[in-house]
Image: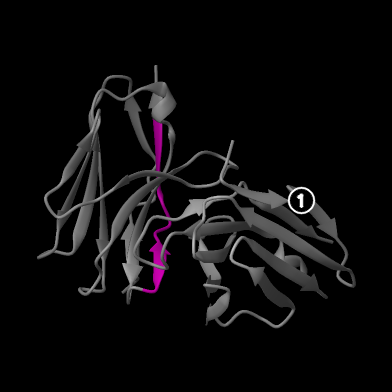
């Protein structure tokens, strides 16, 4: 089983739609979780950290489910500018961050 | 404007060349990383430095040689690379290794010919 697993997509959604991505992780001892966004041929940038209680930042909501070992990202009212690859990131053994392959989102007019 | 800067942004080198990638972070972080990103693959962690000490070498071939002279600078020395080493090489830093978010430089796109 991969340490961090994501559906590669692409998810093609119209503007204004709500879209959700899930990410599963294998190490039950993982403590830190993040969502990053990566635009084509650019570096990954932190979108948001994922807290145990869940957290929201504008149109973006992140959730953590420790029992099932997955995190999720919900994007409401999608914008064209949300088109990117979303990377799930989990720490391993408190020493390094493990990146998923990413889920590609394409928002169309 | 980024807190982590990498040079050069693009590099084309022959298999017999020696070159170096440079990374500098202006964030006061204690940990620095080299990642490799190839097409259709997740980011692969190569090296981790924590307080200038190398704490991780993720089975990287010896043709890649890191150097961390201080907590703000990180180098990746390259020699006798193979065409399959062509990729985007990303430097990142974090306040503490592993448990805090990492901030990335813009990367060096390397092509080995």
Q: Residue at x 56, y 45 (%)?
A: B3
List x then y, in percent, for residue B26.
Answer: 58, 50
Question: What residue is pinned by disc 1?
Answer: B8
Q: Nearer the viewer, residue B113 or A73?
A: A73
Examine the rendered structure and indicate whether residue B45 appears above or below residue A19.
below
Q: Is residue A29 left or right of residue B48?
A: left
Magenta span covers which residues?
A95-106
Name the main secondary structure of what is drawn in magenta: strand
- Classify A62 as above or below B57: above
x and y percent of residue B65 in the render? Answer: 71, 77
Left or right of B81 in this view: A103: left
Q: Position of residue A29 (x, y in %)?
A: 22, 74
In the picture as drawn, the residue positioned furthest to the top comes out as: A109
Query: Taking B79 as reference, is A14 above or below it?
Result: above
Q: Is residue A102 within the magenta segment?
A: yes
Mark 1 surroundings within 10 Å by alpha-carbon count, few (fewer than 14), some (14 through 19), many (20 or more): some
């Amino acid at each position: 089983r991969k340490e961090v697993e994501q559906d590669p997509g692409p998810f093609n959604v119209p503007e204004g739609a709500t879209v959700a991505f899930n990410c599963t992780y294998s190490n039950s001892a993982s403590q830190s979780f993040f969502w990053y966004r990566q635009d084509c041929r650019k570096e990954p940038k932190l979108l948001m950290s994922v807290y145990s209680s869940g957290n929201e930042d504008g149109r973006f909501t992140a959730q953590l489910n420790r029992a099932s070992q997955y995190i999720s990202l919900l994007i409401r009212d999608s914008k064209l500018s949300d088109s990117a690859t979303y990377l799930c990131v989990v720490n391993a053994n408190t020493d390094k961050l493990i990146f998923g392959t990413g889920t590609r989102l394409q928002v169309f007019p | 404007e980024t807190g982590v800067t990498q040079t050069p942004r693009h590099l084309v080198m022959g298999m017999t060349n020696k070159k170096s990638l440079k990374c500098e972070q202006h964030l006061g972080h204690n940990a620095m990383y080299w990642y490799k990103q190839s097409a259709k693959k997740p980011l692969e962690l190569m090296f981790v430095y924590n307080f200038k000490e190398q704490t991780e070498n993720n089975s990287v071939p010896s043709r890649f040689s890191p150097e961390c002279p201080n907590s703000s600078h990180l180098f990746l020395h390259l020699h006798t690379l193979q065409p399959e080493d062509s990729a985007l090489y990303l430097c990142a830093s974090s306040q503490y290794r592993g448990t805090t978010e990492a901030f990335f430089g813009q990367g060096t796109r390397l092509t080995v010919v």
